[in-house]
Image (cartoon, rainbow, N blue to C red):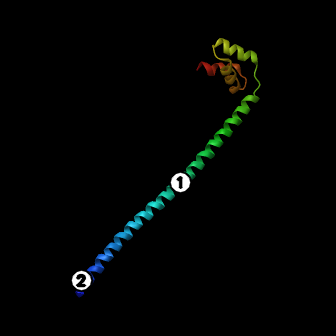
Amino acid sequence: MEAGDEGVDRVVDSKDLQQQSKALDKLTDHVEDRQLDSSRVQTAMASIAASKEADWNAMRMREKELAAVKINSADVDIIANELELDKKVAERTLREHKGDAVAAIRSLLH
């Protein structure tokens, strides 16, 4: 080998090392991105679950409030018969309007 040939081998080796280093960096970046994406997904799922639970609790509270409203069964019958509605719909509407039959009927007619 000549003295000049050793320098060429070193240049090629350093280029190979640079390419390998870049390839390794890309792979490492890809793995890190996937880990970040995974943690984002877990955070988002936890947020969705908390939101869903809050919605469920709010709905249960609303149903308890409506169940506590005193209504007249005669009003339910009149609304159901006159507006040709299911009694459950008439009762629900009446409860939503705190037992006020006139307000319930107005709501149903609009």
Q: Is residue 42 left or right of residue 5?
A: right
What residue appears at the point 50 percent right and 55 percent down from the top-left corner? Answer: 37
Q: Position of residue 69 (x, y in %)?
A: 75, 27
Q: Is residue 43 left or right of residue 24?
A: right
Q: Report the residue at 69% width, 34% height from top.
A: 62
The answer to which of marks 1 and 2 sits earlier in the sequence is 2
Q: Which mark is residue 67?
A: none
Q: Label 1 is placed on what type of residue?
A: Arg
Q: Which mark is residue 40?
A: 1
Q: Residue 76 versus residue 44: which sits nearer the camera?
A: 44
Q: Is residue 84 above or below residue 11?
A: above
Q: Quadrant of residue 110?
A: top right
The N terminus sits in image quarter = bottom left
Asked if the residue under mark 2 is in contact with the one under mark 1, i.e. CB atoms within 8 Å, the reply is no
Q: Which residue is mark 2?
A: 5
Give amino acid for label 2: Asp
